[in-house]
Image (cartoon, grey):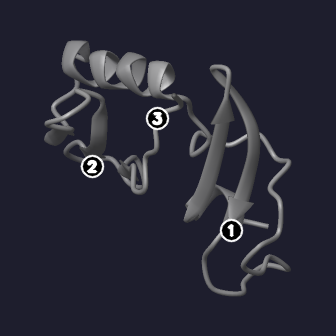
Amino acid sequence: MYAPYYGPLRVIVKNGKIAKAIYVGEKRDSYFPGREVHERTDLKATIDELFSRAQNVIKSSSDAPYKIRYDKNYGYPYCIDVRNPPYTADAQYRIVIDGFKPTQ
């Protein structure tokens, strides 16, 4: 069951905590669009956790190339894209925030 680890997921955060994560990708590994994801996966994150991850990538002594893009209006990292370091397989990942709606 790899779908929850590959995504895409829609993560709903309320009061600074993850309230729900929903798989929104194609049907795979017994997952289908709309199924709630209960597994622990790095794809579930709050905005505060994304800031932390971005800082970890920047501070990392890894040779992995990366790009971090920040939202112009709110300043949160909306894209963290880390490529494989040399001689390492499957270490890359990409987190993209889409449809962010701040609470009032």
Nearer mark to the viewer, of 2 and 3: 3
Residue under circle 3? 102
> Which residue is located at x 36 percent, y 20 percent?
51
| Numbered disc 2: secondary structure | loop
| Residue 59 in the image: above or below residue 37 | above
Left of 27 or right of it: where is 70? left
* Upstream in sequence: badge 1 or badge 3: 1
SS assignment at label 1: helix
* Residue contact at pointers 1 and 2, CB within 8 angstroms: no
Residue at (83, 60) in percent of width and height: 36
Is 2 located above or below residue 66 in the figure?
below
Q: Residues within 10 Å of mark 3 (few under 14, many from 20)?
A: few
User: Is 56 left, or right, of 6 in this rendering?
Assistant: left
The residue at the point 57 percent across, 34 percent down is 45
- Disc 2: which residue: 84
User: Residue 92's x, y, as percent?
Assistant: 35, 50
Q: Is residue 99 above or below residue 66?
A: below
Residue 56's quadrant in the figure? top left
Q: Which mark is residue 3?
A: 1
Per the model, the C-alpha gap separating discs 2 and 3 is: 33 Å
Residue kind at label 3, given as amino acid type = Pro
Q: Nearer the viewer, residue 40 or 49?
A: 49
Q: Is residue 46 above or below residue 98?
A: above
